[in-house]
Amino acid sequence: MSNFVLIAGGTGGHLFPAMALAQELIRRGHTVELMTDHRVESYGADFPARRIHIVPAATPSGANLVRLVGAGFTILRGIGTAWNVLRKLRPDAVIGFGGYPTFPPFIAANLLGIPGVLHEQNAVMGRANRALARFANVLAMSFPVTRFAEKQTLEKVLTGNPVRDRVRPLAGRPYPRLNEKGTIRLVVTGGSQGARALSEIVPAAIALLPDDLRHRLHVLQQARPEDIERVAESYRKSRTSVELSSFISDLPERIADAHLVIGRAGASTVSELCVIGRPAILIPLPGSLDSDQKYNALFMEEGGGGWVAEQATLSPQSLATRLSDLLTQPEKLATAATAAAALGQPRAVEKLADIAEKLGSKQTQIQGSAEP
């Protein structure tokens, strides 16, 4: 049995794959602890770690000198805090999932001689992971082509992005049949908190569809609490069947039942769509750092599993045209579903756990040989 410390920024995009790995390592009989920042209170209440350690962290960005100096001191304090914890725990390996909160613990682990794996969720290597690559033993990638990874000299392994336990059983579920008169199930998701742009554009686009097509639709849409009444009114006016929620607890199952998904292109969203095997219109979050969502979406489009729609040029009219084209060609949707499934990595968490175990066993052997 080995002891692993997982390190992740305290947002869903970093914590969800870390949670999947924690579940797999625990199934294999290992112990897991988590190091993260204070935001874990919003996303990580159910994280299956023996203990959760909050480590001070800061983002060293911006032109304000006072803030930069302050961030530097916070990072140093975080390294000291993590060093004290790791020195007592003496884990066999650490696994980092990106975000600047990963930086202090990963540096502290390196100072203590603890081997480390970095996992990159996106098709663009994050800035924190780029900075930490020189201190890592292995880079685990979610996409076959990851921008900026080619510049790193450490060992690289394609694992895929671990998905939640409830997603994995849905891999291989057949694409639901769609005939000329049957119900068309459309899922609209904007991420963990919904997206205002999707709440404005999607209902307006659906209102422009021909009556016979619109009346076949059943829409499940995620929206922010403050937007729900406005979105509901839009759907009432167009007489469209809709379910609205600020949080969809059974989202993986609802995606598996869907004929088409409209959503952002975060790493977890794209990974789950591909594992489940469902076609999607992906609208990358504009202004995201290094355009990571755009490259995630392009991976799915180039593989034939979806279509990219840039928010800057997307209008209700252009989205209605795209929807009308896709929803009246069931064979096109079914082909895209097959292509999406071919891009999926349902065994990503096993592959990542294998890497962690291999690195951890080497460390155990080294420590054992060093003992008198």
Image (cartoon, rainbow, N blue to C red):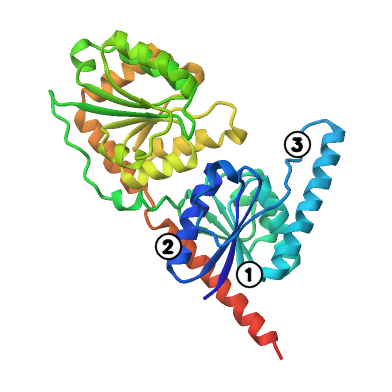
User: Which residue is labeled 3 in the image?
Assistant: 61
Report the number of discs. 3
Q: Secondary structure at mark 3?
A: loop
Of all residues, the one furthest to the bottom in this rendering is 372
Say above or below: 285 vs 370.
Answer: above
Say above or below: 300 vs 75.
Answer: above
Residue type at numbered disc 2: Glu
Closer mark to the observer between disc 1 and disc 2: 1
Q: Return the residue nearer the eye: 8 or 88.
A: 88
Q: Secondary structure at mark 2?
A: helix
User: Which residue is labeled 1 in the image?
Assistant: 91
Q: Position of residue 280 (x, y in %)?
A: 35, 32
Alpha carbon separation for disc pair 1 and 3: 31 Å
Q: Return the residue nearer the eye: 215 or 309.
A: 215
The quadrant of the image that shows the C terminus is: bottom right
Q: Position of residue 290 (x, y in %)?
A: 61, 35
Q: Residue at x 40, y 39 (%)?
A: 300
Q: Position of residue 359 (x, y in %)?
A: 57, 70
Q: Return the residue nearer the eye: 357 or 44.
A: 44
- Whether residue 40 sits left or right of residue 332 in the image: it is right
The disc, 1 or 2, on the residue closer to the chain's N-terminal end is 1
User: Which residue is labeled 2 in the image?
Assistant: 350
Alpha carbon separation for disc pair 2 and 3: 35 Å
The disc, 1 or 3, on the residue closer to the chain's N-terminal end is 3
